[in-house]
Amino acid sequence: MMQVLEQIQRDHRNMRLLLDIVEEEMDAYHEDRVPDFELLRSIAEYTLNYPDLVHHPKEDLVFQRLVARDPAAKGVIGDLTQEHKRLADLTRRFAAAVANAARDVEMPREWLESLAKEYLSANLRHMQLEETQFLPRAMAALTDQDWAEVDAKAAGGNDPVFGEKVEKAYLAIYERIQKVRL
């Protein structure tokens, strides 16, 4: 029961790990050390693909059910679907910037640092809103039948970093996470 809810919570924990790595790498950049731009590019690509294709659609299903049961929730939470689109746009900008940096394209250092801070804070704020407002409200308002229907509609989708099999494109992320966990 409530498999979607458990997956959303697990995805948030995993995303925090990735955001911590981004922050560490950007701290190195701020201190005039060379960050691992390929790792940053890979994380940005992951946060573009997995959340947009698998994670956010699950949340959107829950949000639609919640608003149907509790219309006032939208006033408290806002439009979660639109927020997901804004996050995707910001992530695309961040991904393009780190891809350019990985190719040694010159850009203002302060601009990249500012964009990284915006990317980090927007993601953290978004997850905080979901965990303190959206998910508790959904747990209170949705019935067991609602959760069963959401679980049935939610696409599976393998997590290419945290799933059973790590995709080759994301091995660097996986290896860095293993170092963090040791």
Image (spheres, helix red, strand yellow):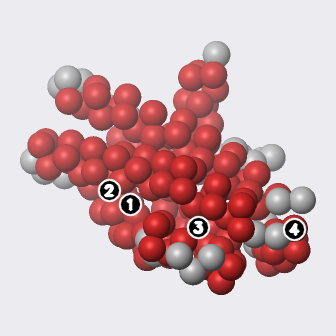
**Compared to 140, does 63 lie above or below?**
below
Q: Distance between the residues labelled 4 and 1?
A: 34 Å
Among the two numbered marks 2 and 4 on one chain, the one whose residue lies closer to the N terminus:
2
Q: How far apart are marks 3 and 1 (CA)?
A: 14 Å
Amino acid type, mark 4: Asp
Q: How crowded is mark 3: few (under 14 residues within 10 Å), some or many (20 or more)?
A: some
In the orientation shown, which residue stands out farthest toward the bottom?
Answer: 68
Label 2: which secondary element: helix
Query: What residue does disc 3 label?
Result: 56
Label 1: which secondary element: helix
In the displayed structure, does residue 68 sit left or right of residue 100?
Answer: right
Identify the image quadrant of residue 155.
Answer: bottom right
Query: What residue does disc 1 label?
Result: 91
Amino acid type, mark 3: His
In the image, what residue occupies the spot 45% across and 40% down? 19
Among the two numbered marks 4 and 1 on one chain, the one whose residue lies closer to the N terminus:
1
Among the two numbered marks 2 and 3 on one chain, the one whose residue lies closer to the N terminus:
3
Which mark, by number, is residue 144? Answer: 4
- Relative image position of residue 16 (x, y in whole percent): 52, 40
In the displayed structure, does residue 73 sit left or right of residue 34?
Answer: right
Mark 1 vs 2: CB contact within 8 A: yes
Q: Distance between the residues labelled 3 and 4?
A: 21 Å
Among the two numbered marks 3 and 4 on one chain, the one whose residue lies closer to the N terminus:
3
Mark 3 vs 1: CB contact within 8 A: no
Q: How far apart are marks 1 and 2 (CA)?
A: 5 Å
- Is residue 11 or residue 37 the one in the foreground? 11
Label 4: which secondary element: helix
